[in-house]
Image (spheres, rainbow, N blue to C red):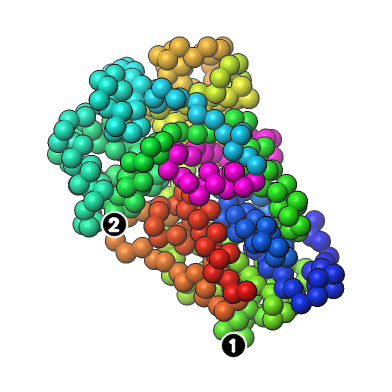
Amino acid sequence: MSIPSDRDAERRVNRPGVGVTHVVGAGLAGLAAAHALATQGRMVTLHESTPGAGGRARALPDGTDNGTHALIGANRAALGFLDAIGARQFWLEPEPDGLPVLDLADGSARQVALSPFGWWRADRRPAGVTPGAVLAMAGMAMSGEDRTVAEAMRAHPAFLRGFVDPLVIAALNTPSAEASSQRLAQVLRRLGAPGATRLLVARRGLGPDLVEPALAALALAGAAYRPGHRLRGITQEGGRATALSFQDHETPLAPADRVILALPPWEALRLMPGLPAPEAHAPIVNLHFAQGCPGAVRFLGLLGGLCQWVLIRPSGVAVTVSAGDAEADQEVEELAPRAWAEIRRAVKAFGVAGDWPEAPPPCRVVKERRATPRHRVGHIPTPPRLPLANLALAGDWTWPDLPATIDAAIRSGLAAAQALPE
């Protein structure tokens, strides 16, 4: 339900001479931009076309997440945003002693240190670790040459399969055979600092542990939030945005008003054709099983199967299939039995307590067909931060220094807020 269009006019009357900043898109980039501006004392209106905030990191109507989203210690912008909205306390480290990884091909189970500095312990090393393999990965991190990750690591296939490929899939959502080594290098260079590889997940879910605290913090800072409020067009004149056309009204922009478009690339292109933007995207498929598991939250990795990451909470079990081109065309009747059989093997291998019946419990499949750009070798299309004098762009695809991640989205939102003229 939209809010009448005169609300911003009322706010201007109450605060004469102060412009309104319209943030369009309540994904993480938009939330971060809106929060940064509102806490600086700016009048902010956050518009969202769907009924709920969060974007690709949203909670679904039934309370489950659309996907398994994790942070690492190197995601300083994301963790700083959690601190700013009072939500850091809700995120926990489920596997502090190393990530449990089951290789479905041979049944081997190990706890893997995510930092190479932890590999001095033989029982924390991923499969295929050799001095040459580690040097090849370090060389990829520092090299200026861009090639596929598979080509860069072709002399070390066991290490590619056991460590590098899962990292590529998780961070770039692109298969190693086409993923850019330079895009992976942007991630690798951030993993050397102390605590950079700590793995963190939302204890209850993205809704209560990220999106709801962000909206509460915005309300506390005086920002207005308008869900179900789709932007249909932008009127431009003289290099400025002069009006925003929503589905039921037009909002003229006063000289002091500002706009941030925090939208996925296809939506930004709909409103502003000609922007440099990624054209190819990769899907992520998520399976949510209605099977609660009492006890601590767990996070497991799997090699050689359908499942890649399994997040186990008391409220249910979530599975992520990144770069899931084939899986995006499959139905739940095909995916759920395969995934559940792999989950049962993993929980048995790592002694996860709970009831794990042979038949799969009810399962919901969520498919994000354009979850991220395909991070291929070659030029990164990067739009200007300020394509108009009073309009800034945000979104993970606008941040060239990282692949499309939560951290990139938040960094882009903060950069857009900072780029707007006073």
- Going by the numbered disc 1, the residue's amino acid type is Gly
Residue 227 position (above or below residue 125): below
Q: Residue 82: image x %, image y %?
A: 59, 43
Instruction: Please indicate whether residue 270 sits to the left or right of residue 147 in the image.
Output: right
Q: Which residue type does callout 2 highlight? A: Val
Crowd around label 2: few <14 · some 14–19 · many ≥20 (10 Å)? some
Q: CA distance from mark 1 to mark 2?
A: 37 Å
Does 59 appear in magenta?
A: yes
Tell me the magenta residue range: 57-85
What residue is at 60 percent from the left and 81 percent from the top?
Answer: 240
Residue 196 locus on image (x, y percent): 40, 39
Looking at the image, is mark 1 or mark 2 earlier in the sequence? 1
Residue at x 65%, y 46% (from the top left corner) = 85
Q: Name the residue that disc number 2 marks.
A: 377
253 is higher (above) or lower (below) than 267? below
- Residue 177 part of the magenta segment: no
Determine the image quadrant of residue 11. bottom right
The reply to whether residue 35 is in sight is yes
User: Is residue 194 found left or right of 356 in the rendered image?
Assistant: left
Residue named by callout 1: 238
User: Which residue lies at the image location 49% right of the left edge and 37% below the top edge?
Assistant: 70
* Left or right of 103, for residue 244: right
